[in-house]
Image (cartoon, rainbow, N blue to C red):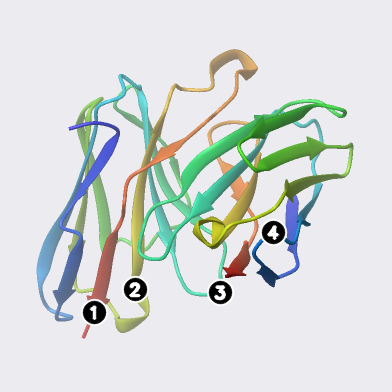
Amino acid sequence: EDQVTQSPEALRLQEGESSSLNCSYTVSGLRGLFWYRQDPGKGPEFLFTLYSAGEEKEKERLKATLTKKESFLHITAPKPEDSATYLCAVQEPGYALNFGKGTSLLVTP
Amino acid sequence: ETGVTQTPRHLVMGMTNKKSLKCEQHLGHNAMYWYKQSAKKPLELMFVYSLEERVENNSVPSRFSPECPNSSHLFLHLHTLQPEDSALYLCASSQAPLAGGNNEQFFGPGTRLTVL
């Protein structure tokens, strides 16, 4: 069975302190790896889709990268409004997305 | 309305009640999903409807009953729930990932369900 593991479980950063979140996966034949942001009490908000090793995508202070075994979500100079839980998911054959447990990010002023 | 909407946003029910959750998508998608999100656990896929036909049912107890009358609407009918069913229930939609295509799913805000 495909597995998705996210680390760290929680991360606290000072405003402006760059860092990376990790998503490692085991899957036979990657069809897509997705990053979502989830604020407390809300549904996940789609951020990125990555399809093949070496691919990178950027959105404001976020940059997602993909290798054959893991994906990183790099956060450059974060702001307090970047505080949220970031979810990684791998597309399985069929309709299912296999989600990790998420990384809870807190950015303090 | 835009995106995926869900009603109600909060629901408190007793174990003997019957209630329904509603989801509507305004994205022109043809696949819809119900997920359960509990604390400290990954999202759990419950049901998938594609082109209004149920295509996945992940061993969900029969006290949860989905209904998809058309490609824009999805319901989850609840009856005789247990306290452990308390969770955030999320609806999502996507273009059906036919022929190996991607499955970018877009989520609604969720219904926070508490079973007493």
Are the residues flagged by discs 4 and 1 in contact, CB closer than 8 Å? no
Q: Quadrant of the C terminus of chain A?
A: bottom right
| Mark 3 surroundings: few (<14), some (14-19) or many (≥20) residues within 10 A | few
What SS does tag 2 mark?
helix
Q: Are marks 3 and 4 in contact (CB under 8 Å)?
A: no
The amino acid sitting under disc 2 is: Asp
- Camera-side residue of A57 and A46: A57
Callouts 3 and 2 in the same chain = yes
Q: Position of residue B37 (x, y in %)?
A: 44, 63
Label 4 to label 1, Cα distance in Å?
42 Å
Residue linked to disc 2: B85
Residue A7 falls in which quadrant of the image? bottom right
* Label 1 residue SS: strand
Q: Amino acid at mark 1?
A: Val
The residue wearing badge 4 is: A16
Which residue is pictured at 38% across the width and 40% down the height? B92
Chain holding disc 4: A
Q: Are marks 4 and 1 on the same chain?
A: no
The amino acid type of the residue labelled 3 equals Lys
Q: Quadrant of residue A29?
A: top right
Whether residue B112 is situated above or below residue B95 in the rendered picture = below
Q: Position of residue B25 (x, y in %)?
A: 26, 32
Distance between mark 2 and mark 4 Cα atoms: 40 Å
Amino acid type indicated by mark 4: Gly
Mark 4 falls on what kind of element? Answer: loop
Q: CA distance from mark 2 to mark 1?
A: 7 Å
